[in-house]
Image: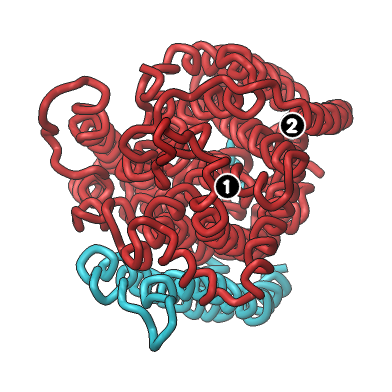
Chain colours: A cyan, B red
Amino acid sequence: MLDKQGAVGTGLRETDRIMGDPVFQTLVRERTSFAWTMSAIMLAVYLVFILLSAFGKGFMASTIGGSSISWGIVLGLFTIVFAFALTGIYVSRANGRFDDLTAQLNRDVG
Amino acid sequence: MRLSRTLAVASATVAASVSAAAAAGPDLGATQQSATNWEAIIIFLAFVLLTLGITYRAARSTRSAADFYAAGGGISPGQNALAIAGDYMSAASFLGISALVFTSGFDGLIYSVGFLVGWPIVLFLIAERLRNLGRFTFADVASFRLDQTAIRILSAVGTLTVVAFYLIAQMVGAGSLIKLLFGLPYGYAVAIVGVLMIVYVAFGGMKATTSVQVIKACLLLFGATIMALAVLWHYGFNPNALMADAVKIQPKGAAILGPGGFVADPVSTVSLGLALMFGTAGLPHILMRFFTVRDARAARKSVFYATGIIGYFYVLTFIIGFGAITLLMNDPSFYTVAADGTYNKLTGLIGGGNMPALALSKAVGGSLFYGFIAAVAFATILAVVAGLTLAAASAVSHDLYANVIARGRSTERREVMISKLTAVVIGIVAIVLGYMFETVNVAFMVGLAFAVAASCNFPVLLMSLMWRGTTTRGAVVGGLLGLVTAVLMVVLSKGVWVAVFKYPAAIFPYDNPALFSMPLAFAGIYLVSKMDNSRQAQRERALYEEQFVRSETGIGAAGVHAH
């Protein structure tokens, strides 16, 4: 009933075989760097928004052109749309490239 | 002490300690029990009947443990996204954030953005690995190669702590809100919520809990969309005209376009931001939803759709808040008006600080639409507490009972039985606590739940997944360090030390602990694991490859779910 037993059941030899598979190595290398880069971008954009809210109040309250819409509101809405767009980019790459690699790996391993 | 209850609703609302005062305003007066609202009661009863019917059907098709905890892995990505979004679109965030926009404008966005940006992180780092490694609870994942007993106890403590704070805040909010909207006494309201959530969870398990959440999410999205469209239609779909009008009408004027009162303290703001962002990745009732879908691919799609739905919802609440400013503030009929004809535009709304969205529903759609929105608000609380209860029940039965107490020798049937009993007990405890906390300011509780999730559950989960060097000893020490410091710092902060215990000055100067407690947890896990050279630690490191392969590919995970 424990997952651990299931894991041990998979067998160390199979683990070694997959770890050594070039397809697996490509998958892990590409996905790891992609996921961490995307996380860093999200964190950076959010930190810009939060730090401006905390330290740049004057800028955030200033309106754009002759309108009544402020930079703060635009940046806030931008961050929301940006977060959604990032998840979209990740999912499209994962559904294509990463799933293809995983499928290939599954065929290799059998 | 009725005032504090009003503050409490506001708090549940805004989901963190910093904002409670800002959201509720300085003095809201008492929450009055209003006249019985028949439209709302009838619509709510229809919702209850529908969901009980679904629960009955779910109960008949729930046989195995996988059915009960994870709906047999049979939830589609679209449904799961709605359920995840539903867990996020609590009455708190609907009423609270729109109320915060109403009183402070831009400040409401700080919460919305903070709540949303956790999702990409969950997607990039957590969701697929969780699905590949786990069955029912996130402890399955964290304890994959670490010591079952220690890690499951730690995870269960983390889960129960988060759920307890979240649940109390929801119950107190529910009682006050329902008293206000339906004209029901506080005690009845709390009891109704408690009993219904027991029925959903104990009989219908994850299938019923998910259905309730999905239906409610659709109703809430529908209602909020209508309100936002009504506001925009009023301004010829020109947001600039809406903003310009709001600046003219709101007493704070152009100040509502930028950060205001509650970001007075930059450290607290950044700390809150971190708690909101990383807390998402440690909330047990959210994490369990990744086990209800077929595979990692479905988990990934769920997060993508959910992020879109939640983002859309927050844009709506922002429009609703601004619409409430322009359509309500010049209309004395929505306010408690003094004898000399004056009223406080910010805090004088009839019913108190959480009312902007509800009053706006009356302004744009009359009493029938108001009844609908009130009923949806009640349904929202119900759906969220059901999810929380299921997460806690799973932690007790699957982690503590089946794997720690019975050491894997329990049967599925008995495990599910224990889970159902736990749900009943939690329901009763929640009713009692909700009743006891009626007059306590629970403003700090949701903020605390996020802080604990970000400082205990998230670091343990991330480090066990990502770093080969993590050992049981490190995870336990670091996790507990995060948990204890988060709770301690909140207790010593203004929200509890001053507001609840009535001491004159706070010992911990900031409103949110995450900026300190989260790095402490990571440092604790890292350092203690580094120093741990026991044989167990070596074995755990050696098992990393196996966990790694499965978490990256799902190979070996097939067959984990009984379909």
How far across and how far down the image is residue B265, in percent?
19, 53
Q: Is residue B47 above or below residue B400?
A: below
Horizontal side of residue B478 vs B238, given as left or right: left
Q: Residue at x 77, y 37 (%)?
A: B207
Q: Nearer the viewer, residue B512 or B299?
A: B512
Residue for badge 1: B357
Q: Residue at x 24, y 68 (%)?
A: A57
Measured from the top left, where is residue B170 in percent x and y? Answer: 52, 30
Badge 1 element: helix
Q: Residue furthest bottom?
A: A65
Q: Is residue B421 left or right of residue B401?
A: right
Q: Quadrant of residue B238?
A: bottom right
Q: Is residue B458 above or below residue B181?
A: below
Where is residue B19, by image quadrant?
top left
Q: Residue furthest front?
A: B340
Q: Is residue B105 visible?
A: yes
Which residue is depicted at the point 38% across and 24% down? B3
Q: Chain of mark 2?
A: B
Q: Which residue is mark 2?
A: B40
Residue B33: x, y in percent? 57, 20
Instruction: Tell me if I can see residue B461 in this picture.
Output: no
Q: Quadrant of the C terminus of chain B?
A: top right
- The alpha-carbon separation of the residues under discs 1 and 2 comes to 15 Å
